[in-house]
Image (cartoon, rainbow, N blue to C red):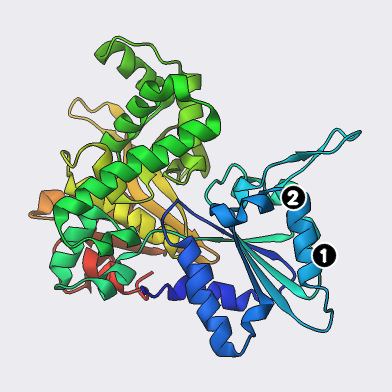
């Protein structure tokens, strides 16, 4: 059993806090194991009677009847009738609840009505999992009226991965960079089996799920082409208009920007990718387009393009981005606009990019990801943006090399990626 300490602590700290705990994340990242195994075991060791823990897995045949909201609510009502006792209920894949039309009433009984009813039992602590942000995460504030507490689960971080990996740190990172951190991979010993598994998962589970959920059967080929382009352009600036023009010029097929935008949102709703906006550091405003997209798991990204384009520089950037998200930061791409005199002594506008601006409460960091800094020219290229930013927040350069971390005369911290991923004291 791989320890998921970060998420277990969140569950423990939110016990009986009056909110429904909604555990979200990409399919197969470990939500069910966290709830039904790790947290369940914690409660048993704590002394909770197993009879007081109700478990329902809506994706299993034995529990299909509970997809009906009325049957589910009636069952729970009977199960928690003893008011002097405390109960826990775990419901897996809550998005499978089927909305029920009520005769004479325009609205339907669905997920949020069920959760609101269950949350009314003061002796019941409610925990549910879901794999679709469109039905869960993005609607919590508007539909669930602040009565839900979302705990977002991700594939294994490198620090979680390395504890279960049989090998040294450098070999572990190379493996992680290629195959990612989906927990299921530890059941395969052969790399060929891992490759086959990831290819099948991205096609038969994730893409198929998006197609079925959004009714995109006739557009399956186009959907796949859009995802292929995003997979190939990880860490690169992308806009729906540039993608549309690219399809038109390269494959002689017109796909409208609106269609592409819809498909990208579908990928985001399935937690497969995440959009990151650019932020004008001097102007203190967001720039709508272009943006960057990162994969929730680099193994999934590599599988989508057949493990053919293993661009370590951009994959490093993806891994760093994911780590920052896991650590609870809001992450943007930084843009700095400034002016220089060119060789003709004319004023020229220049835009510099900071890979990541990371914010969490009063904490703020500027981070550059660099495969290496072999000479002074490359050093100046990577740190030029830092020198223009006029504030005291920590600036960090993360390198592929396994170096001993140090600060230069300007206070810029240099650290190897493996140490950065394993030491949460750095940020």
- At 23% across and 54% down in the image, what residue appears? 179
Measured in 3D between alpha carbons, the distance from the residue under mark 1 to the one under mark 2, in whole angstroms, is: 15 Å
Q: Secondary structure at mark 2?
A: helix
- At 32% across and 60% down in the image, what residue appears? 184
- At 77% across and 58% down in the image, what residue appears? 73
Dot 1 or dot 2: first in sequence order is 2
Where residue 65 appears, as percent x and y from the top left, is: 67, 51
Location of residue 242 with respect to 75 vertically, above or below: above
Q: Secondary structure at mark 1?
A: loop
Q: Is residue 370 visible?
A: no
- At 75% across and 70% down in the image, what residue appears? 18
- Badge 2 density bin: few <14, some 14–19, many ≥20, Cα 10 Å: many
Of residue 297 and residue 397, the one placed in the foreground of this image is 297
Farthest residue in the left direction? 374
Which mark's residue is nearer the viewer, 1 or 2?
2
Residue receiving disc 2? 69
Location of residue 308 with respect to 229 vertically, above or below: below
Where residue 110 appears, as percent x and y from the top left, is: 73, 45
Where residue 271 appears, as percent x and y from the top left, is: 46, 46
Left or right? Give the position of 259 relative to 231: right
Of residue 174 and residue 194, the one placed in the foreground of this image is 194
Of residue 284 and residue 364, the one placed in the foreground of this image is 364
Q: Quadrant of the C terminus?
A: bottom left
Q: Quadrant of the N terminus?
A: bottom left
Left or right? Give the position of 85 relative to 278: right
Where residue 36 appears, as percent x and y from the top left, is: 52, 69
Q: Is residue 165 visible?
A: yes
Q: Which mark is residue 120?
A: 1
Q: Which mark is residue 208?
A: none
């Amino acid at each position: 059993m791989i320890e998921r300490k970060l998420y277990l602590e969140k569950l423990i700290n939110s016990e009986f806090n009056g909110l429904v705990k909604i555990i979200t994340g990409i399919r197969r990242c470990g939500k069910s194991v966290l709830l039904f195994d790790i947290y369940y075991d914690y409660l048993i060791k704590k002394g909770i009677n197993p009879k007081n823990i109700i478990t329902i897995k809506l994706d299993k045949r034995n529990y299909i009847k509970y997809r009906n909201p009325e049957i589910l609510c009636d069952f729970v009502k009977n199960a928690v009738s003893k008011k002097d006792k405390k109960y826990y209920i775990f419901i897996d894949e809550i998005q499978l609840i089927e909305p029920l039309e009520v005769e004479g009433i325009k609205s339907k009984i669905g997920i949020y009505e069920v959760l609101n009813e269950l949350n009314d039992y003061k002796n019941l602590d409610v925990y549910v999992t879901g794999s679709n942000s469109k039905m869960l995460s993005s609607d919590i504030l508007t539909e669930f009226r602040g009565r839900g507490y979302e705990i977002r689960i991700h594939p294994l971080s490198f620090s979680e991965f390395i504890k279960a990996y049989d090998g040294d740190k450098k070999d572990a990172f190379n493996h992680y960079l290629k195959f990612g951190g989906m927990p299921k991979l530890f059941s395969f010993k052969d790399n060929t089996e891992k490759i086959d598994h990831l290819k099948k998962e991205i096609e038969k589970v994730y893409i198929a799920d998006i197609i079925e959920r959004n009714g995109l059967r006739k557009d399956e080929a186009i959907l796949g082409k859009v995802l292929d382009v995003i997979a190939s352009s990880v860490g690169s600036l992308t806009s729906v208009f540039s993608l549309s023009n690219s399809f038109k010029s390269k494959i002689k097929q017109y796909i409208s920007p609106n269609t592409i935008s819809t498909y990208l949102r579908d990928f985001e709703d399935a937690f497969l990718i995440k959009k990151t906006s650019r932020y004008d550091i001097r102007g203190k405003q967001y720039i709508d387009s272009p943006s960057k997209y990162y994969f929730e798991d680099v193994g999934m990204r590599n599988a989508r393009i057949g493990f053919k384009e293993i661009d370590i520089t951009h994959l490093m950037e993806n891994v760093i981005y994911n780590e920052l998200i896991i650590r609870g930061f809001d992450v943007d791409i930084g843009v700095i606009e400034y002016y220089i005199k060119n060789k003709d002594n004319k004023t020229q506008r220049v835009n510099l990019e900071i890979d990541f601006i990371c914010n969490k409460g009063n904490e703020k960091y500027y981070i550059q990801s660099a495969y290496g800094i072999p000479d002074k020219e490359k050093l100046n290229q990577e740190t030029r943006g830092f020198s223009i930013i006029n504030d005291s927040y920590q600036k960090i350069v993360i390198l592929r090399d396994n170096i001993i971390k140090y600060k230069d005369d300007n206070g810029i911290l240099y650290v190897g990626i493996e140490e950065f991923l394993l030491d949460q004291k750095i940020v």
